[in-house]
Amino acid sequence: MNRKAEILYRLGEPLAAGMFEHENSSVVERFGLGLRRYFEHAAPPPESGRLYPAPEHDIWNLAGRFVRFHYSFSLGCDGDGLRRLGRERLADPFERNLLDRVIDELDYFRSDLIPPRYRIGGNGWTHCVLNYRRILGEGLGGYRKRVNAMPPSPLRRALSDTLAGITDFLRRAPGDIAACAEHPARDFRSAMRSFNFFFALDCYDSAGRFDDYMGEFYNGEPDAQMWLEELYCAVDLHDGWHFLHTAKHPAFTRLCLRAQKLRRPNSGLLAGPETPPEIWEELFDVWGRGVPCPSVYNEAAYRSGIRHGSDAKGADRDRFAFGGCTELMFEGCSNIGSTEGGLNLLDILNNSTPSRFRADIRLRMEEFASAVRANSEFAAQYRPQLIRTLFVDDCIDRNREFNAGGARYYGSIVNVAGLTDAANSLAAMRGIPEKFGNDSPEVDEIARKLAHHVFSLIRRYPMRQGGPAYPAVILLTGYAWHGSYVDASADGRPAGAPVVDSAGAVAGTDRNGPTALLNSVAKLPSRLGIGTLVLNVRLHRSLAASRTKRKLLKALLRGFFAQGGLQLQPTLIDQETLKKAYENPAAHPELIVRIGGYSEYYNRLSRELQFEVLKRTEHMI
């Protein structure tokens, strides 16, 4: 055995050891053997609930401490921790040197070619939706047959090793999880157990149109909501991401909404004229109990934007979903950089002049797009994603790895920070005092023209694997950081203050009511920004409390969508409660707020972000 592998086995790192057993093999084969060895050494946890693994167990934390699978970057390596362990357990200086070489190589696989100035909400990050419909329809056995039918290649050997490891783990696991995963789902119970296992393999990333495909198996099971609550608990514990609800199966969709009691999953609801009234009522029930999920998406606007701004074809256009916070992708068949990075418009403006601003944006975008393509090529060579290669179409059929052209569709979410701040600053330079978000024609027109120019420019550039760019405003918690290095701006914002948290108004500057805010945002060219233009809105909790208020709230949302608005994510909370939470966050551990694209417990935010949420205008109707 390779001595590096022997050392790693002695240190209890089977994933890394497998990667060094045959060091002269191709990178993809080394990753495949690493995954196989991980699963062969992983001790299956006991059953302790309906799902397997149960929420408290992490399927990727059962063997090894310092080298782990990562759903976006393929590997996670705590090099310092592994080096300390080596110093404690390895007496031979030569073996210590070998371990240093191992750590250097593992760190290299994680190399990031996105320059720091473009790491806007991401740095080559990749969320994904596996083809859960196909998984439930074929089972692991169906995928094994397809891999066995591939022509001989390093990728086939890597996938065979990956499947062998997963199969070995399942064979030793308790209960019937092996049968549930191996065969097509036959009922709600087997579908939920199978889905949860494969979802755990992808680190609970994003589920796509969950109520659509899982609703096919729902047959009125009396304990269905308890199954969903256990699943949501796992997603929350493991920082999982997006679930999209379509209301194709209204009874099941209502259960999905009713089960939402935690900050995760970061769910969304596709809404339109045909959304059943009972779904709206269930949505308002969820919001009314203080849970700001799901956010709502304008289905018609996305469909229009996808027709004009993506390379998806035919029925695949109907498979659009969201990953991570709310990044557009296509269920089971895409590899979309999400988020890839982006541009800080206020930073560019502050280092430019009004006459040079557009030219400087173009130069920055050229540089960023070049970095994205280089990072994509690096990932294709050094960061194989074998779980996604197995379960995303058309990797097996093309005999190509997920990062190397195997998926059907590629592309990149390009984030835009400081859009509203830049528009307000340009307005101030022209002597216009109004702020965006108040339905003020002059500043709104400046924002519209700026967004149209920037989004159109972004869309000109080929990105990951030559796929299209999808402009977006999705800032997570990074809007404080992306303002921390920007000097004072013409709109009156102090040096180092946060930039705007969404495509809406700067916190506290929307003073003409919610209709005015939504009118301003609806003027932005949302069809060009289908990556998603997130809109954070604070609404008074009473708006979900009565039938009369709910009618007004529904009319407000539908009016926004009728004007072309893309997405809206509310936090329904009264100012008094939020003030108390700001004064004593620890006393409000269950308070959930929307923050830059997803939900988070208020007491987990930095003091700066807690204050930014407090500053948001509280809207009544």
Image (cartoon, rainbow, N blue to C red):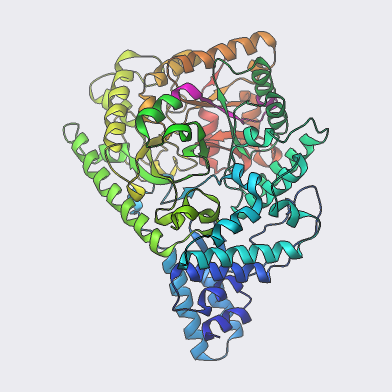
Q: Residue at coordinates 44% horizontally, 69% vertically from top-left? A: 27
Q: Between residue 27 and residue 226, name the one nearer to us.
A: 27
Q: Quadrant of residue 460?
A: top left
Q: Between residue 218 and residue 560, name the one nearer to us.
A: 218
Decide: is 52 above or below 27.
above
Q: Residue at coordinates 32% horizontally, 41% vertically from top-left? A: 487
Q: Between residue 350 and residue 99, name the one nearer to us.
A: 99
Q: Is 493 situated left or right of 154 in this image?
A: left
Q: Quadrant of residue 539?
A: top right
Q: Quadrant of the N terminus?
A: bottom right
Q: Is residue 376 magenta?
A: no
Q: Is residue 65 visible?
A: no
User: x and y percent of residue 219 in the render?
Assistant: 77, 31
Decide: is 524 above or below 335.
above
User: x and y percent of residue 86 in the render?
Assistant: 56, 81
Q: Is residue 288 magenta?
A: yes
Q: Residue at coordinates 43% horizontally, 48% vertically from top-left? A: 122
Decide: is 538 above or below 559.
below
User: x and y percent of residue 397 in the render?
Assistant: 47, 53
Number of numbered callouts drawn = 0
Q: Quadrant of the C terminus?
A: top right
Q: Is 606 situated left or right of 339 in this image?
A: right
Name the residue furthest top: 548
Decide: is 458 above or below 395.
above
Q: Between residue 599 and residue 565, name the one nearer to us.
A: 565
State the extent of the magenta-drawn residues as a range: 286-302
User: x and y percent of residue 89 in the render?
Assistant: 61, 84
Q: Is residue 15 visible?
A: yes
Q: Residue at coordinates 68% horizontally, 33% vertically from top-left? A: 216
